[in-house]
């Protein structure tokens, strides 16, 4: 039963994604452009996360006098 539900859900989601790409294509936005934008957004988010981690690590080291 769970497998059937999972397969049905994936089918619906794939259909929605396909409809989205088809609609965007009609407005002149190609699938590759959408994917490139998503990759760029993911890269920016990763860079921001790395910077936040670096800042948090520096603050932690300052609090515990790590390495001094």
Image (spheres, rainbow, N blue to C red):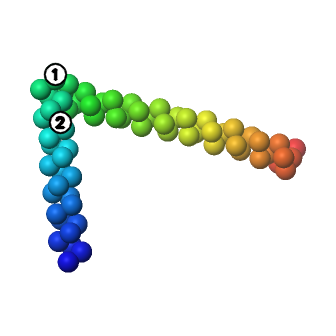
Left or right of 49: which side holds 58? right
Q: Is residue 67 visible?
A: no
Please determine whether, in this image, residue 57 is positioned above or below residue 28.
below
Residue neighbourhood size for the residue with mark 1, other residues' Cα within 10 Å, grouped as few (<14), some (14–19), many (≥20): few
In this view, the residue farthest toward the top is: 28
User: Of helix, strand and loop, which one carries label 2?
Assistant: helix
Out of 26 and 36, give the one closest to the viewer: 26
Query: Residue 52: horizontal and vertical position, in percent?
Result: 63, 39
User: Of helix, strand and loop, which one carries label 1?
Assistant: loop
- Name the quarter where the C terminus is drawn: top right
Left or right of 5: which side holds 39? right
The residue at 55%/35% (across/down) is 48
Please determine whether, in this image, residue 11 is positioned above or below residue 35.
below
Residue contact at pointers 1 and 2, CB within 8 angstroms: no
Residue neighbourhood size for the residue with mark 2, other residues' Cα within 10 Å, grouped as few (<14), some (14–19), many (≥20): some
Total label count? 2
- Say which mark, if any, is on residue 43: none
- Name the quarter where the N terminus is drawn: bottom left
Residue under pointer 1: 28
The residue at 21%/52% (across/down) is 13
Left or right of 63: which side holds 1? left
Residue under pointer 2: 21
The residue at 16%/23% (across/down) is 27
Query: Residue 35: horizontal and vertical position, in percent?
Result: 28, 34
Q: CA distance from mark 1 to mark 2?
A: 10 Å
Answer with mark 1 or mark 2, whichever residue precedes in sequence: 2
**Quadrant of the rendered structure where residue 43 is?**
top left
Q: Is residue 31 visible?
A: yes
The residue at 52%/34% (across/down) is 47
In this view, the residue farthest toward the bottom is: 1
Query: Residue 14: horizontal and vertical position, in percent?
Result: 18, 50
């Amino acid at each position: 039963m769970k497998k059937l539900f999972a397969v049905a859900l994936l089918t619906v989601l794939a259909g929605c994604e396909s409809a989205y790409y088809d609609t965007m294509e009609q407005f002149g936005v190609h699938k590759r452009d959408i994917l490139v934008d998503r990759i760029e957004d993911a890269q920016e988010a990763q860079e921001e996360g790395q910077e936040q981690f670096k800042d948090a690590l520096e603050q932690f080291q300052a609090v515990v006098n790590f390495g001094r």
